[in-house]
Image: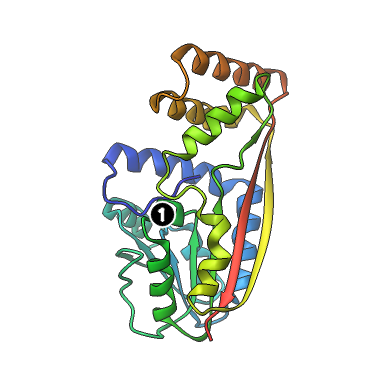
Amino acid sequence: MDRTQTTGRTSDDTDALIALLDIVDDVPWASELRARSYELLGVTSDAAMVDVGCGSGRAVAEMAERGARAFGVDLDERMVAVAGRRWPAADFRVASAYGLPFADGELHGYRADKVYHVLDDPARAVGEARRVLAPGGRIVLIGQDWDTFVIEADDAALTRTIVHARADLVTDPRVARRYRNLLLDAGFADVTVEAHTTIFTDATWVPMLADLAEGARRAGAISDAQAEAWIAEQRERGRRGRLFLALPLFVVAATRP
C-alpha cells in the first residue's frame, strides 16, 4: 500500500512496487476508492488534474477517460517511463511533490493517494498544492494511518508490537490523521473527511502481513522466532479461511478559496 516519493528506490524495488500496485489497483475496493476520489475532485471535461505520486499511472488514465486533462507526477524516472508506455496518450512528468511543474493556479484538481506518509514535510507539499490550484480547485488526499492495522492473531500484545514497530519505519506513519488540519492550516475551505475501511480475509494478503512482521524483526522489536511464529500463524489462518485484517483509509477533500 506504499506509493513512494523518493529517489532512494532501486530498479528491483520499482519492479516490485509496480507488481504490487497492479494487484492492488485491480481489486474492487481500490477501484471504488479511486472513483470516489474523482467524484470529490469534480473531474469534468477539460479540467486540469494532477495525480502526485502517480506510480504506474492508472488514476491518470482513468481521469483522462473522464475527459480531464490529466497529468501524472512521480520522482521515480523508471516508474514514469512505465506509466508512459502503458498510457501513451497521458502526460507523465518526473517531479517532486515539493516542486510541481505547473504555473500558479494552473490546475483544477490535485490528487495524492498513499503518498504523504513517505514525505518528510507534508505541510510543504500541501502548500505547493495550494499554489498550483486555481481558486475553486479541489484537493483530495488518500492514505492509511499505519498504527491502525486491525489484525486477528492469537497474541494480541505481540501483534500490537509488530504494528507499531512497522509503523515507526515509515517517514510519517500517522500523517493521514493530520490531513484535515494540514489542509485547514494551509487555508483550504470546505474540508471533509471520510473513512473507508477495507477488510482482507483472503490468503492472497498474507505477504502484506508478513511484511509487517519482517519490518518489526528488522527493527529489533521482535525476535526471529516471534516473527516466524506469527507469520506461520497468519499463513495457517489464510489456509483455513480464517485470516482477518481491517485497514481504514482516510479520504480528505477540500477547496482552494
- Residue 195: x and y in percent read 68, 56
Residue located 56% across and 50% down the image: 144
Vertical side of 112 occupied by 47: above or below: below
In this rendering, position of residue 93 left or right of residue 141 = left
Vertical side of 40 occupied by 6: above or below: above
- Residue 222: x and y in percent read 47, 21
- Residue 60: x and y in percent read 47, 65
Amino acid at the residue labelled 1: Gly
In this rendering, position of residue 42 left or right of residue 216 = right
Q: Which residue is mark 1?
A: 55
Front-most of 81 and 189? Answer: 189
Vertical side of 9 occupied by 180: above or below: below
Q: Quadrant of residue 152?
A: top right
Disc 1 on helix, strand or loop? loop
Residue located 58% across and 75% down the image: 254
- Residue 225: x and y in percent read 48, 11
Front-most of 35 and 170? Answer: 170
Q: How is the image coloured?
A: rainbow
In this rendering, position of residue 229 left or right of residue 119 = right
Q: Residues within 10 Å of mark 1 (few under 14, many from 20)?
A: many
